[in-house]
Image (cartoon, rainbow, N blue to C red):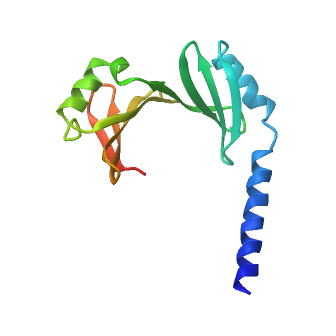
Amino acid sequence: MLKKWMFSFVLLLFIFSAKAQFRKIPADVTDSFKIKYENASAVSWKDRLSSFQANFTVGDKEMKALFTSRGEWIKTETKHTYNSLPADVKDGFKKSKYADMDVLDVTQMEDKDDQIQYRIVVKKNDFNKRSLIFSKSGQLISDNASL
């Protein structure tokens, strides 16, 4: 009985997930994207249920942007290298207690309030991985355990 219930639950979850991924991207969303990122290439879309995510490149930068279903821009994330970070952010990281950890990933995050932050994912070992958020002035805003 439990196996049948579990199978039904997994099947229902799969169907719901698949259906959510095939929802048509609204024209308001794609139009807003084209206006904001007219030079974007290699664009692909994901339905995030509460928003729509565009993955794309501009020049050599890998980016993703989120929009509401009404086409309102929420935020953009841009991949960076550690060396391309602003000096203040690198200095803040070097002064943090995480400076001896290996840098795995660096992302610039910009939101609709023009707030820019930087996420640096670091790892000391397989069990100690952190997601660090720095302000553009180099202040550590948050540090969270990461998988």
The image quarter containing residue 91 is top left
**Residue at left offset 78%, top offset 36%:** 25
Residue 133: percent from the left, percent from the top? 35, 38
Instruction: Using residue 144 as the reference point, say whether residue 38 is left or right of it.
Output: right
Callout count: 0
Residue 46 is drawn in which quadrant? top right
Q: Residue at position x 33%, y 54% from top?
A: 127
Q: Is residue 90 above or below residue 22?
A: above
Q: Residue furthest front?
A: 126
Which residue is at 64% across, 19% downward?
Answer: 36
Residue 139 placement, left or right of 3: left
Side of 54 where 93 appears, left or right: left
Coordinates of residue 13 in the picture (x, y in percent): 73, 63
Up/down of 55 relative to 15, above or below: above
The location of residue 110, given as percent across then percent down, is 48, 28
Front one among 70 and 47: 47
Residue 139 % position (x, y)? 26, 33
Depth check: 89 or 28 in front? 89
Q: Is residue 41 above or below residue 78?
A: above
Image quarter in which the N terminus is found: bottom right
In percent of the image, x 70 and y 30: which residue is there? Answer: 44
Query: Would you say 53 lies left or right of 103 here?
Result: right
Q: Residue furthest bottom?
A: 1
